[in-house]
Image (cartoon, helix red, strand yellow):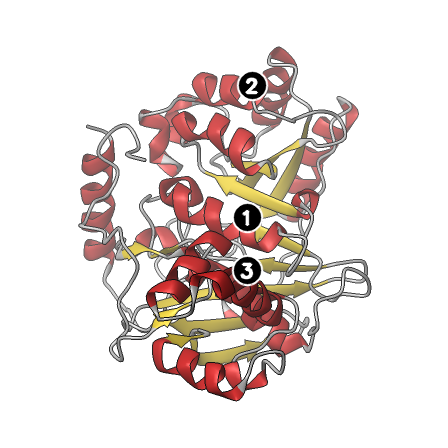
Amino acid sequence: MQIPGHIDPVAVPRGEIARADGRVDVVGLTRAELREALIAAGIAEKQAKMRAQQIWHSIYNRGATDFSAMTSISKETQAQLAERFVIGRPEVVEAQVSTDGTRKWLLRSADGQDYEMVFIPDADRGTLCVSSQVGCTLNCRFCYTGTMKLVRNLTAGEVVAQVMLARDALGEWPSQPDGRLLTNIVMMGMGEPLYNFDNVKKALGIVMDGDGLSLSKRRITLSTSGVVPMMARAGEEIGVNLAVSLHAVTKEVRDEIVPINKKYGIEELLAACAAYPGANNARRITFEYVMLKGKNDSDDDARELVRLIRKYRLPAKVNLIPFNPWPGAAYECSDDDRIARFSDIIFKAGISAPVRTPRGRDIMAACGQLKSAAEKISRAELDRRAAEKEAAWTL
């Protein structure tokens, strides 16, 4: 689907990425697409549906990375499949582990593009932060990823493969709904998910499929900076939890730090939140709010946030995120007592406002810090890129 407006600051390939060896990656294909691919590869049409189901189960339930591991398929057919297909995983360029247990992977695609994913373990859950783009369409000024050029959207297979790679690393095959370390997924990595809607929708459909990865939609959260025209579709067609990168309550400040606000303003965004399908007190919308010293952290800002949530009668909670520094950042983190005061004002209004504990800062894996380390650029270049992106999607 073409999203309204000019949204891509650079040309973005829309189709699947061709492999140098000519084989087709089956990860990310729907059941119907897998069946058709098998028929095209010479599998008899009467057998293709059964073979597709066997392959699907082996990949997504058993974690198979090679056709030779699929013992329900004859060796002759295994060889035939291996000639035409591959069960893909991204190349791991670097794997880091923080002192707090957070894990970050720098990944490389078949066409040589780098992106990152992060796993955050907690006592009661394990959350995988998944990327949707190489680089980012947007230019939120407090976010390191936003300084990158948008190279291209990740394919559905590349999104799904992040989950599968994490399962590999955690030893969580065969797939079981109970006792998992990886219990939750957040689409909060590199990129704006709603500017890669079709691939994200397809990927999450596979992740939620009961005969495979089988994560409940209640354990998946999609975060957007406010791509208003796509929010209702996300609720209707994907149906996962919604998080909104709000970060400011006045037009002046949000225009500066989340410039997409110039295209879709706060009032328009909050109206879309109020209309989000499935939002209720049991499935609250999460508002992400990064705490920037002297910029968006006053008592008046907290009171205005409460007023806006009440005005739109939003079933909401607010995640307060201490700013995570990165090289060249123009902002500082609010003081601890200021963050506590801000949280207290919201709590006393009856709205949950926990302060997120920074995780993985020592390996640049915290919120807003994801960016390929291969790229080192100047402040002048950062500003130039920001202006270029903003000019592209505010037309």
Q: Nearer the viewer, residue 257 or 152?
A: 152
Q: Position of residue 367 (x, y in %)?
A: 53, 54
| Dot placed on the residue nearer the N-terminal end, 1 or 2 | 1
Q: CA distance from mark 3 to mark 2?
A: 31 Å
Q: Secondary structure at mark 3?
A: loop
Q: x and y percent of residue 4 in the render? A: 28, 28
Number of callouts in the render?
3
Name the amino acid type tagged 3. Ala
| 36 to the left or right of 281 | left
Which marked residue is nearer to the observer: mark 1 or mark 2?
Answer: 1
Residues packed near mark 3 inside 10 Å, few (<14), some (14 to 19) or many (20 plus): many
Q: Measured along the vertical axis of the image, is residue 164 above or below residue 12? A: below
Quadrant in the picture for residue 238: top right
Question: Of callouts 3 and 1, which one flags the residue occurring earlier in the amino acid sequence?
Answer: 1
The disc at residue 287 is: none
Q: Which residue is mark 1?
A: 205
User: Rounded to the nearest whole Å, what is the CA distance between mark 1 and mark 2?
Assistant: 22 Å
Looking at the picture, how far across and down is residue 272, in whole percent? 50, 21
Marked residue nearer the N-terminal end (3 or 2): 2
- Give the mark toward the camera: 3 or 2: 2
Disc 3 vs disc 1: which is toward the camera?
1
Q: Tell me the kind of residue under disc 1.
A: Gly
Q: Can I make out residue 195 in this image?
A: yes
What residue sits right under mark 2 in the picture? 275
Q: Mark 2 and mark 3 in contact (Cβ < 8 Å)?
A: no
Q: Which residue is painted at 30% across and 68% down in the image?
A: 113
Residue topped by disc 3:
366
In the picture, which quadrant includes the C terminus?
top left
